[in-house]
Image (cartoon, helix red, strand yellow):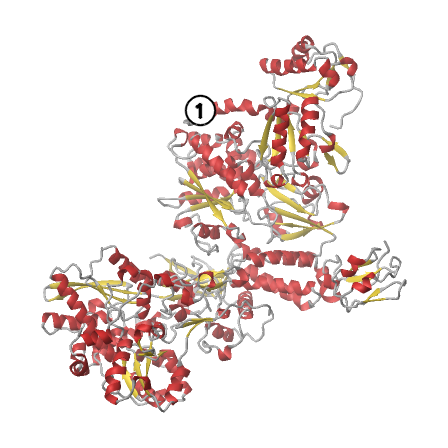
């Protein structure tokens, strides 16, 4: 690769040809402030519209200031990143952006985590000499996401995520000039749009323009109601990210502290969604093997590949976009909903509580889960299997609100019976994890042999679309994996065209899987945070004694005492669902 | 429609269609050409100005002289109709009186071709604003 | 005999089609239809006096012709050979009728290259175009020149882009030629967005083949077989004529497959824009053509490297293209001999505002504003005093008296704080308030900003708001410093050419008319009387008879006075609603910049 040399703030720096000024400056240890720019390395996700103009620098010989995030560095360039001209321009632009922004930081969902606020502090903004009209829009609340686009600064990150990464097309820049904003077409509500509630727009929004629907106060109310028994379940990836909210390094596992915190918050039973993940493997794995055997036996009515269905954003996506393929995904419910169904039947019976007096709260890395638990299919006589779904961020907030010193907490265990899980369950949080867990069980059930090596490294990784062939004792099983809905679309298009070579496909809506979920602490464009979380998940798996779902003793007990066998009638009634064609629920088709 | 297949085709076609617009081209560079104005008011027409104008149009073209032949109103020399004003390049206009086709022939051959004056010139008695 | 009737959009909207059909009807009635041809042409440019009818070969130039004048033109001019005096243009200075266009001040100083055939040929008849050299340049290039040689001619001519930026056309072609790709595009930018500008429209309406031919030449040079014309959907006549022209050129084998037997293929399609100003910017234009939101992206990459659908794309505007065939046929040296050192050839301007001859003009580079305003434009309307001229469209700048003798070219306009732009020229007189003028342009810019980059989206809005405050009488001296800083930051940091030039109206008026701004913010005075809140409604005591009509109709009871005595307006109460003026039968109420009557009528 050709190298070039340039001078930034009197420092000479050598970079590869093609690097931007911003990249070159970083290499020289100079941090140029940015706002709209965002990059997730290794995932091919980048947002560089060059719109905010915060990162402008002075390039010798150039008439105007150059946006460093999109201007290529050239050999011999002489750059100043902090001349008075640059500082004045940067501050003036910042003041302009703030002049069209609400001043309600005190009550903003993003306060303390807002990139605009951080910059305003860094720039020392104390007054706005350019006050004037502010652009205002209708607030829009959907089951998962709140749009308060008065706070939109037109960074276009959400638009890029929704269109380029997820290919959902729910959010686009609309209107012109001062009234420009990112919104669904014709400024309709998100609920009428093709939105899947994957929440990746929220995950990247630098301000409070996009945020999750907060359920903390409902949970608080339930906890304070003496007539209610409140149980909580926590998704696998939450424990790998929650610590970040308390200043711990990304990738710090806080499973024990999390359980302890939940107990101190007053939850009557602290359970684990991982238990339900093991249950999911039993059901989904059985379905996979059933379809596979029928297929091998020549049954033409059986469709392959089978697709995982744990991810509610992904379920929404195929219900909207692939209504002709509704019989392809597994009918198994997601772990959250399996947990709810078992908690409000099996467990409620066990402790002798009426389902109406049992409140199930989930802590999820996800915004689509908020929508999922409100779906009518997951209710019995109007009573939902899962009452409230909180995000990792909401839990952290809740712990802080309750002035619990997180660092000082002892490590505690989950309660039984719904708190026991295997290593297979925890890896559900990573892309490739669900299918790896399924393979661990399916292999042993199918071949009747015990795995020599529990880990399937060929299924791991960060590439958007991956494939591997697993040897089921002489039978090659082709596995496909996609994370990010744009990648999922590619695999689905193959299935629709009849060209798919896979027997099974795992899909997760969020880049990286649940560790990159929209309910997780904000990554602010640092992809190394996601990598650290993924690593933590695998290390927890390694530390587990039991690492295959079918070996979870409490799962065995559940089948023995209550469900019978995987795929039984009872299991189908409680743990499986049907999907719906939702393509006509979108007001405007894309 | 036959397609134009070569540059030569295009040039040929241009020659063909040029005549249709030559009137306009000439008008745009009238001062470089011979300008013939035939007075065609009632008095002129009555004295045969129409035939004279026809003659100029046809004959000038036939004899390969680029000229602009126009009609104009009464020039005020009703006594000498038909009257014709000839303007050669870079020369002052000259008005001829009692022009019939025979006289017109003489004007073309002598004055227009060689700049040689012929009988019948009427002295000008007014300024035009041009 | 040929009768040319202007069929430009302007004249068509004042019934030129009816004039044409009436002329034809009259001719038929007199059985002269075979002797006299009526031809509908493109714009003559002299729109102030439209509709125009030009009778040839005697080149009589009739102005402001009405359909009912057709009979008289046929009866008098065609049959009797007498010019219809009352329809001739009257020279405003000499107060004399001028019968032909060559002697009109409006045309005398003009040099028509891009507009060479406008108002002269029937744009819907390719044969007329061919008779006037259309496709000769293409034929010559295909038969005699290599693409490199052709580019060399364009480079040598020093033709610069006429769309605003002034980038050398030949260099652009060369860069696009050197970009390696299996597919390239030639795009003609016909998204004319400046208010009051109609240069491109007139060329497309009057001589569409000149643009088609040039696009094919460009395609040959850069190695492209496909051209796209991005045209505003609001130009129905231009679209219609382009469609006819493309169809005719294809049927003649001058566009399409194997042009003139040389094996060169070039097809041209139309793409319609919705009329967003920013879509005149080439990257925005390309995004719009791709069906995306019309907004710019950073350059580089330039379209000549990565443009439409990611392929190398050469974008030139209509006027730039229209110059090309003439350059090929007459030679680069001829073209380069016209104009100034760094600006060659001519420029088409749309002359508008407080000027006698509103219209479309084409003048050699280097001409002065004085010549344009006083000779071609016929001076300021109503004999008022010239104050400023806005060049370069809405994001250009205001030039003043001191610039009147500056030769107009790309560099001098920039130096003077304005720009060439696409060629709008709006003249202002002593009655214009320069703060209001700046506000007017900022209003347009705010409307047309795409909203992508923060300085343009918010900064221009704030500029507008500050100007609005000043015209309301609520400005402070600090506002002037804010205007300056904001303007310079917007110029320095905006993403595209629109934003980078958008504060020009503010900066140029602040520079050239600072005292007017100070009057507004310090003295709370608007010398032109245009700013209502800074003006005073005053009753002239000598004219007022004390009838009480104003007093009874004042909605805020700001007027006092005894019957049959002169009345008074309390300025503090007055809301400047004009109700009193409407009711006064004695013309006694005046709006002025001072609270006292300045001079009696």
Give whichever of A501, C418 is nearer the camera. A501
Q: Position of residue A32 (x, y in %)?
A: 46, 68
> Vertical placement of A36 versus C403: above or below?
below
Give whichever of A418, B118 is nearer the camera. A418
Spot the residue most to the bottom.
Answer: A226
Q: Quadrant of the N terminus of chain C?
A: top right
Spot the residue most to the front.
Answer: A381
Could you tell whether C275 is left or right of C551 in the image? left
Residue A509 visible to the viewer: no
Residue A571 visible to the viewer: yes
Could you tell whether A34 is left or right of A464 in the image? right
The quarter of the picture where residue A366 lies is bottom left
Give whichever of C217, B121 is nearer the camera. B121
Residue, disc 1 = B8
Which chain letter matches label 1? B
Give whichever of C259, B50 is nearer the camera. B50
Could you tell whether C205 is left or right of A525 in the image? right
Label 1 sits on a secondary structure element that is helix
């Amino acid at each position: 690769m050709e190298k070039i040399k340039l001078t930034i703030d009197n420092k000479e720096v050598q970079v590869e040809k093609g690097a931007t000024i911003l990249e070159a400056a970083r290499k020289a240890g100079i941090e140029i402030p940015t706002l709209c720019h965002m990059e997730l390395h290794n995932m091919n996700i980048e947002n560089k519209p060059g719109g905010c103009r915060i990162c402008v620098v002075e390039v010798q010989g150039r008439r105007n200031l150059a946006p460093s995030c999109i201007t290529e560095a050239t050999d011999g360039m002489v750059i100043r990143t902090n001349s008075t001209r640059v500082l004045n321009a940067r501050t003036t632009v910042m003041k302009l952006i703030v002049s069209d922004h609400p001043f309600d930081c005190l009550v903003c969902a993003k306060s303390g985590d807002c990139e605009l606020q951080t910059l305003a502090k860094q720039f020392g903004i104390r007054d706005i000499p350019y006050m004037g009209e502010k652009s205002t829009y209708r607030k829009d609340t959907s089951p998962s996401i709140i749009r308060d686009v008065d706070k939109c600064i037109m960074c276009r990150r959400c638009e890029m995520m929704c269109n380029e990464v997820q290919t959902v097309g729910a959010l686009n820049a609309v209107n012109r000039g001062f009234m420009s904003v990112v919104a669904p077409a014709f400024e309709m509500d998100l609920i009428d749009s093709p939105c899947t509630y994957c929440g990746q727009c929220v995950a990247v929004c630098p301000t409070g323009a996009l945020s999750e629907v907060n359920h903390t106060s409902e949970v608080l109310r339930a906890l304070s109601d003496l007539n209610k028994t409140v149980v909580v379940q926590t998704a696998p990836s939450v424990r790998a990210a929650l610590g970040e909210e308390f200043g711990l390094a990304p990738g710090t596992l806080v499973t024990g502290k999390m359980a302890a915190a939940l107990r101190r918050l007053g939850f009557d039973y602290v359970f684990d969604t991982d238990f339900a993940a093991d249950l999911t493997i039993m059901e989904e794995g059985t379905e996979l093997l059933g379809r596979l055997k029928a297929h091998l036996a020549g049954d033409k009515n059986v469709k392959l590949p089978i697709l995982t269905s744990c991810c509610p954003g992904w379920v929404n996506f195929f219900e909207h976009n692939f209504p002709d393929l509704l019989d392809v995904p597994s009918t198994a419910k997601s772990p959250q909903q399996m947990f709810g169904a078992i908690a409000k039947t099996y467990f409620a019976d066990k402790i002798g509580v009426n389902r109406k007096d049992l409140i199930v709260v989930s802590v999820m890395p996800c915004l689509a889960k908020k929508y999922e638990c409100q779906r009518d299919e997951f209710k019995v006589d109007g009573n939902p299997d899962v009452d409230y779904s909180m995000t990792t961020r909401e839990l952290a907030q809740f712990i802080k609100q309750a002035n619990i010193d997180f660092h000082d907490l002892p490590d505690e265990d989950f309660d039984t019976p719904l708190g026991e899980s295997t290593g297979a369950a925890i890896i559900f949080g990573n892309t490739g994890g669900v299918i790896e867990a399924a393979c661990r069980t399916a292999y042993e059930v199918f071949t009747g042999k015990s795995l020599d090596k529990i880990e399937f490294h060929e299924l791991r990784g960060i590439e958007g679309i991956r494939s591997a062939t697993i040897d089921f004792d002489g039978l090659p099983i082709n596995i496909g994996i996609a994370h990010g809905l744009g990648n999922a679309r590619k695999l689905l298009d193959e299935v629709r065209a009849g060209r798919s070579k896979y027997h099974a496909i795992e899909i997760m809506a969020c880049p990286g899987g649940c560790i990159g979920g929209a309910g997780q602490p904000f990554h602010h464009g640092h992809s190394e945070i996601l990598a650290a979380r993924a690593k933590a998940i695998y290390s927890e798996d390694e530390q587990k004694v039991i690492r295959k779902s079918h070996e979870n003793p409490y799962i065995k007990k559940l089948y023995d005492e209550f469900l019978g066998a995987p795929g039984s009638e009872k299991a189908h009634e409680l743990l499986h669902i049907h999907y719906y064609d939702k393509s006509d629920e979108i007001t405007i088709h894309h | 429609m036959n397609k134009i297949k070569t540059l030569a085709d295009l040039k040929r076609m241009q020659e063909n269609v040029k005549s249709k617009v030559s009137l306009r081209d000439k008008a745009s560079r009238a001062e470089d050409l011979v300008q013939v104005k035939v007075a065609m008011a009632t008095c002129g027409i009555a004295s045969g100005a129409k035939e004279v104008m026809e003659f100029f149009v046809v004959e000038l073209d036939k004899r390969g002289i680029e000229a602009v032949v126009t009609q104009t109103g009464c020039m005020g020399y009703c006594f000498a109709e038909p009257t014709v004003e000839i303007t050669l390049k870079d020369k002052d206009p000259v008005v001829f009186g009692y022009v019939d086709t025979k006289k017109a022939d003489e004007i073309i051959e002598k004055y227009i071709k060689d700049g040689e004056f012929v009988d019948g010139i009427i002295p000008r008695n007014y300024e035009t604003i041009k | 005999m040929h009768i040319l009737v202007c069929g430009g959009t302007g004249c068509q909207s004042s019934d030129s089609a009816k004039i044409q059909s009436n002329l034809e009807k009259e001719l038929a009635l007199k059985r002269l239809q075979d002797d006299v041809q009526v031809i509908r042409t493109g714009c003559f440019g002299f729109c102030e006096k439209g509709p125009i009818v030009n009778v040839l070969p005697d080149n009589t130039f009739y102005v402001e012709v009405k359909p009912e004048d057709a009979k008289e033109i046929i009866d008098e001019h065609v049959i009797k050979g007498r010019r219809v005096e009352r329809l001739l243009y009257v020279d405003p200075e000499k107060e004399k009728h001028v019968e032909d266009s060559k002697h009109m001040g409006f045309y005398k100083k003009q040099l028509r290259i891009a507009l060479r055939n406008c108002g002269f040929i029937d744009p819907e008849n390719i044969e007329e175009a061919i008779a006037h050299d259309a496709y000769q340049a293409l034929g010559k290039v295909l038969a005699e020149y290599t693409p490199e040689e052709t580019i060399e001619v364009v480079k040598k001519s020093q033709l610069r882009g006429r769309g605003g930026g002034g980038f050398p056309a030949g260099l652009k072609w060369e860069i696009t030629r050197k970009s390696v790709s299996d597919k390239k595009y030639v795009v003609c930018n016909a998204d004319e967005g400046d208010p009051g500008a109609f240069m491109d429209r007139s060329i497309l309406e009057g001589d569409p083949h000149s643009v088609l031919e040039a696009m094919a030449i460009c395609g040959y040079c850069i190695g492209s077989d496909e051209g796209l014309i991005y045209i505003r959907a609001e130009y129905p006549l231009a679209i219609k004529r382009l469609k006819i022209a493309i169809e005719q050129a294809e049927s003649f084998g001058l566009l399409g497959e194997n042009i003139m037997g040389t094996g060169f293929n070039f097809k041209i399609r139309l793409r319609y824009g919705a009329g967003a100003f920013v879509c005149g910017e080439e990257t925005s234009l390309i995004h719009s053509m791709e069906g995306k939101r019309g907004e710019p992206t950073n350059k580089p990459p330039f379209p000549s490297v990565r443009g439409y659908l990611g392929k190398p794309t050469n974008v030139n505007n209509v006027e730039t293209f229209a110059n090309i065939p003439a350059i090929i046929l007459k030679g680069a040296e001829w073209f380069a001999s016209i104009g100034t050192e760094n600006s060659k050839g001519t420029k088409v301007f749309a002359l508008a505002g407080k000027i006698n001859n509103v219209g479309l003009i084409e003048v050699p580079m280097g001409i002065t504003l004085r010549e344009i305003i006083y000779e071609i434009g016929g001076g300021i309307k109503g004999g008022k005093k010239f104050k400023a001229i806005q060049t370069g469209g809405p994001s250009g700048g205001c030039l003043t008296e001191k610039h009147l003798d500056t030769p107009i070219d790309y560099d001098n306009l920039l130096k003077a704080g304005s720009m060439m732009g696409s060629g709008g020229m709006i003249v202002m007189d002593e009655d214009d308030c320069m703060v209001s003028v700046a506000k007017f342009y900022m209003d347009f810019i705010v409307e047309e900003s795409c909203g992508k980059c923060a300085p343009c989206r918010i900064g221009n809005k704030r500029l507008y708001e500050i100007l609005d405050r000043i015209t309301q009488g609520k400005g402070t001296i600090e506002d002037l410093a804010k205007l300056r800083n904001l303007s310079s930051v917007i110029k320095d940091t905006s993403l595209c050419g629109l934003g980078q030039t958008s504060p020009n109206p503010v900066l140029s008026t602040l520079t050239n008319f600072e005292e007017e701004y100070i009057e507004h913010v310090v003295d709370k005075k608007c010398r032109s009387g245009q700013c209502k809140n800074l003006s005073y409604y005053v009753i002239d005591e000598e004219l007022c008879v004390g009838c009480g009509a104003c007093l009874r109709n004042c909605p805020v009871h700001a007027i006092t006075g005894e019957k049959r005595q002169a009345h008074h307006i309390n300025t503090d109460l007055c809301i400047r609603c004009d109700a009193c003026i409407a009711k006064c039968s004695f013309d006694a109420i005046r709006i002025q910049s001072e609270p006292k009557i300045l001079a009696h009528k």
